[in-house]
Amino acid sequence: MNQRARLDPVPIPFIDVAAQRRRLGRSVDEAIARVLGHCQFILGPEVRALEAELAAFCGARHAVTCASGTDALVLALMAQGIGPGDAVICPSFTFTATAEVVALVGATPVFADVEEVSFNLDPESLQRACAAARELGLRPRAVIPVDLFGQPADHDRIASIAAAQELFVLDDAAQAFGATYKNRRLGTLAPTTATSFFPAKPLGCYGDGGAVLTDDEELAQVMRSLRVHGEGGGGKYDCVRIGMNGRLDTIQAAVLMEKLKIFPEEILARERIARRYSAGLADVATVPKLAQGSTSVWAQYTIRLAPGRRDALAAALKSQGIPTAIHYPTPLHRQQPYQ
């Protein structure tokens, strides 16, 4: 009985945030203590410092931090004036926030398909979605490609179609901050790139957080105004536009600055683990395949199985203490809000 108990597998978390906490605990605690000492909890010096470091990391001119990855998408759409009568093309296979933000600004999400290999937006389907939007009497104004599971979308082809269709490109890199496409980090491949610092993301804070990256100075200034209720140059009671409360708090900025120090090392560790998974699973499943010239940060390692095998494999792994999850069980175009 005791021998069997010793052999029982110990379940591991799907995302083990505690492991990183054990490594960075002291430095993060000290960073938080500094914020508690100066008491500048809203837009304190750590927020400005983090924005500079994020921009430098990606090679972008500006980083505008905000309260969540969802707010990052909203800020970018608001800054472009996208609203009622406008269509925004989104992949149907993604987390709901990608389409949700379109509805929140009053525009209409029009769904496109994804490529079977990468799970990312299919450029040919983008073309068809623009035509479908016009048939509905909508103005195609923007496209939100998603860099799903940590791998960049086909940004060159998407940019080419977007230019021909006169679409604003907002890259949803919530799962892919730190990934590269043709030797360039995400953050400079589209006019704006939104990302998330949700705790389970490759670079996550100890709560909610997000950022928008851009080379456009005017756009960055507008988004900085929008995140503080449309504040103008005259101070907090000078309102020059309709905005929102979308700021990143200083404590989360302090946490992220400590995590960013080891982030390149963690990306390499994720890559090593992904290679090991691929070597061990290639005979039993369809494993991820990276596009030539791209790197992934492996927010999730996603495999495909023959019909009828998925649940059996998940059960077998669970019996060994290995967690799995379905990403995503229902595409957005089949979900109730978008019917």
Image (cartoon, helix red, strand yellow):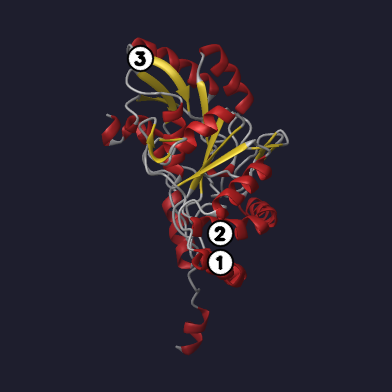
- Asked whether disc 1 touches disc 2, contact meaning CB atoms under 8 Å apart, the reply is yes
What amino acid is labelled 2 in the image?
A: Ala
| SS at badge 1 | helix
Mark yes or no: residue 126 visible.
yes
Identify the disc placed on residue 160.
none
The residue wearing badge 3 is 138
Q: Residue at x 51, y 35 (%)?
A: 146
Image quadrant of residue 238?
top left
| SS at badge 2 | helix
What amino acid is labelled 3 in the image?
A: Leu
Q: Is residue 236 left or right of residue 181?
A: left
**Earlier residue among tags 3 and 1:** 1
Q: Position of residue 122 (x, y in %)?
A: 52, 26
Q: Quadrant of the N terminus?
A: bottom left
Q: Residues within 10 Å of mark 2 (few under 14, many from 20)?
A: many
Q: Residue at x 55, y 70 (%)?
A: 29
Q: Position of residue 239 (x, y in %)?
A: 37, 34
Single out the mark in the foreground, 3 or 1.
1
The residue wearing badge 1 is 34
Image quadrant of residue 338?
top left
The residue wearing badge 2 is 254
Q: Is residue 80 above or below residue 336?
A: above
**Earlier residue among tags 2 and 3:** 3
Observer-nearest of 27 and 282? 27
Total marks shown come to 3
What amino acid is labelled 1 in the image?
A: Arg
Q: Residues within 10 Å of mark 3 (few under 14, many from 20)?
A: some
Observer-nearest of 15 and 319? 15
The Cα atoms of the two marked residues, 1 and 2, are separated by 9 Å
Q: Residue at x 58, y 40 (%)?
A: 63
